[in-house]
Image (cartoon, rainbow, N blue to C red):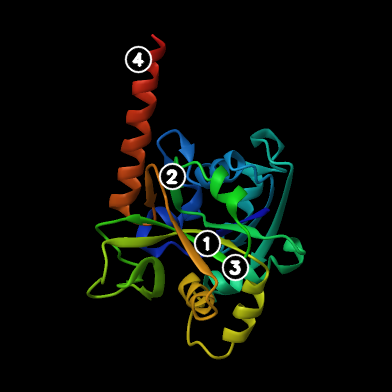
Amino acid sequence: MKGVLLCGGLGTRLYPLTRATNKHLLPVYDKPMIYYPLQTMLTAGVTDIMCVLGGPFAGHFFNLLKDGKELGIRSLQYAYQDGFGGAGEALLLAEDFAGNEPLLVMLGDQVTDANLKQAVQDFTGGATVLIQEFTDPDGMGVPEFDPNDPSRIVGIEENPAKPKTKYAATGIYMYDTKCFSFIKEHLGQVEGEIKPTHINNKYIAEGELRWQRLDGFWTDAGKFDRLLEATNYFADKAHKKRKVVK
């Protein structure tokens, strides 16, 4: 399995910070935000990674990540999204990179300490969405479960005014290569951005979407309160670790 990290967009919810650099390079405690999803991929055994960049600060990533070797990345590639067609359009840039292999896809602002190694090993095709309970689903997809079979998601609603469940689809997905044909199918048919929700609902329609609960801390750090939550969590975790060592 290969990894695709989506780091485009302008990060307008974090203005004025993101007028100076890309959202995914902002600090979360003692590390740039992008280090967290990269570490999640590496811990899961995914070491061939593509970062899809966008916006006016793409060059900042090269100064930080270079070829990825210092972080333990075996092969790091970059692609540039010229425009704002959403995560789907960005993911399409990774089609040649994927080849015939499945992908672990993460939005660059997904900050977690969950271990995905088993989920990656268990993946057999189709799509797998990682979900977690969340009290603020703003900007997220909310899954609806089959009332007769709670193990099955029957639909995902983007940014609902009245969420049907207390869960959110995290920005962490595993896809087989059919995702690219689904994205192409949506091009020209969907107004505005092509979101992961569009892709996930296509997999649902095909009967090929599964879900797993994400264990551990997780947040989408694209808002000030969530960015602070992530910083406080990892600061507290580091302080507790130091006390144990002493």
- The secondary structure type at the circle numbered 3 is loop
Tell me the quarter of the picture where residue 215 sits.
top left
Which amino acid, by three-letter code, is at mark 4?
Lys
User: With 92 as the anchor, is 164 left or right in this view?
Assistant: left
| C-alpha gap between disc 1 and disc 2 | 17 Å
- The secondary structure type at the circle numbered 1 is strand
User: With 170 as the anchor, is 167 left or right in this view?
Assistant: left
**Mark 2 near mark 4, Cβ–Cβ under 8 Å?**
no
Image coords of residue 72 (percent x, y): 67, 36
**Mark 3 near mark 4, Cβ–Cβ under 8 Å?**
no
| C-alpha gap between disc 1 and disc 3 | 7 Å
- The secondary structure type at the circle numbered 2 is strand
Report the residue marked by disc 1. 128
Tell me the quarter of the picture where residue 160 sits.
bottom left
What is the crowding at mark 2: few (fewer than 14 residues within 10 Å), some, or many (at least 20)? many
**Mark 1 near mark 3, Cβ–Cβ under 8 Å?**
yes
Task: Evaluate whether residue 140 shows in this view.
Answer: no
Q: Earlier in the sequence, mark 3 or mark 4?
A: 3
Report the residue marked by disc 2. 112
Which amino acid, by three-letter code, is at mark 3?
Gly
| Residue situated furthest left in the rendering | 162
Report the residue marked by disc 3. 126
Between 178 and 40, the one lying in front of the other is 178
The residue positioned 50% from the left and 81% from the top of the image is 205
Task: Evaluate whether residue 230 shows in this view.
Answer: yes
Report the residue marked by disc 4. 243
Image coords of residue 13 (percent x, y): 35, 62
Which amino acid, by three-letter code, is at mark 1?
Thr
